[in-house]
Amino acid sequence: MCERDNLEAWSRQGGFDWAMNRRRFVAAGALGALAACAPRAEEDAGGLIEERVSVPSPDGTIDAFFVAPARGQHPAVLTWPDIAGLREAFKVMARRLAAQGHAVLVVNPYYRAMAAPQFADFAAFRAQGGFEKVGPWRAALTPDAVMRDATAAVAWLDARDEVDSGRGVGTNGYCMGGPFTVYSAAAVPGRVRAAASLHGGGLVREDDPQSPHRLLDATRAAYLFAIAQNDDAQEPEAKTVLRAAAQAAGVPAQVEVYPADHGWTVIDSPAYDSAAAERAWAAMSALFARL
């Protein structure tokens, strides 16, 4: 899980250059200049459109980033960022996913407290006392609250011209956003058909009746649970519980421990591992290709 011991370990590794990670990431996705300078919503160059949007939810208005191919209709993907929130790194990753043929909505999970970005990047999160700042914001993200937001986000996506509402919706989540993918699938089981949790925390909480593993039988999605090696070392039983819960629920689930540390798929994370990140991206892409 994305907790203080991980940040302390990353600090001991020294500095990191997420701009370099970004360049490697977009190069691996063969997006080149498109990812670095995508056309805005008012432009149509046959590539991508993107815009900052407002999504009405029962708890307020969610500010979010939307990006999609400029032409045609495409299956939607709802993205839940990690603990540092919606920022440039997640826009870059959303553009790559959109270029693969998806309409992607990256929500600000902390909209109840303030608009995004709360932090420019993960280095800023670390330098500015991120855990202290987000603590009360995270407290508001109960399973029920996330499910309300997911329901609102899916409805917003289905109303967009860029979205093919006849196909399923995918969702991906990172770090604290990992369990939100299961909540999303449980909130809108008729629409969410694929969910990818990337180094998600809190997927198995035995004393919680709303633990994500207990909600799988309320969903109709196929799953990818990509687990960090250090998270697995702390909770080695979680992968077994997840596999058993998915089997009991009758939902397909790929549960795999990756040889990389928590945060390895996020391009501005000090733990970013390009080789392992590309493996996880390929698995997620294959999952979403079936929407």
Image (cartoon, helix red, strand yellow):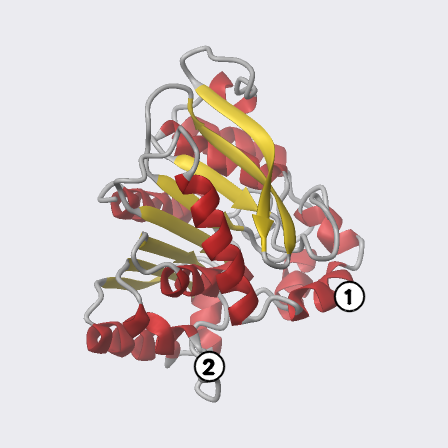
Q: How busy is the neighbourhood of tag 1: few (under 14 within 10 Å), some, or many (20 plus)?
A: few
Give the Cα distance between marks 2 and 1: 23 Å
Residue depicted at x 53% and y 57%: 149
Residue 216 visible at all: yes
| Badge 2 element | loop
Q: Which residue is mark 1?
A: 132
Name the amino acid type tagged 2: Arg
Above or below for 37 versus 205 = above
Left or right side of 224 for 6:
right
Relative depth, front residue between 200 and 115: 115
Image quadrant where residue 275 sits: top left
Q: Quadrant of the N terminus?
A: bottom right
Looking at the image, is 160 positioned above or below residue 33?
A: below
Q: Residue furthest right?
A: 128
* Residue 288 on image: x %, y %: 29, 44
Q: Quadrant of the C terminus?
A: top left
x, y percentage for residue 147? 48, 63
Pick whichever, 229 or 202, lies toward us.
202
Quadrant housing residue 165: top left
Disc 2 residue crowd, few under 14, some 14–19, many 20+, Cα 10 Å: some
Residue 262: image x %, image y %?
51, 60
Residue sitting at 55 percent across and 53 percent down? 271
The foreground one among 120 and 113 is 113
Residue 262 appears in view: no
Could you tell whether 214 is left or right of 67 in the image?
left
Q: Which mark is residue 216?
A: none
Are the residues tagged 2 and 1 within 8 Å (C-beta)?
Answer: no
Examine the image and state in which quarter residue 198 appears: bottom left
Q: Position of residue 63 (x, y in %)?
A: 63, 43
Q: Which residue is mark 2?
A: 205
- Count of numbered circles in the view: 2
Label 1 secondary element: helix
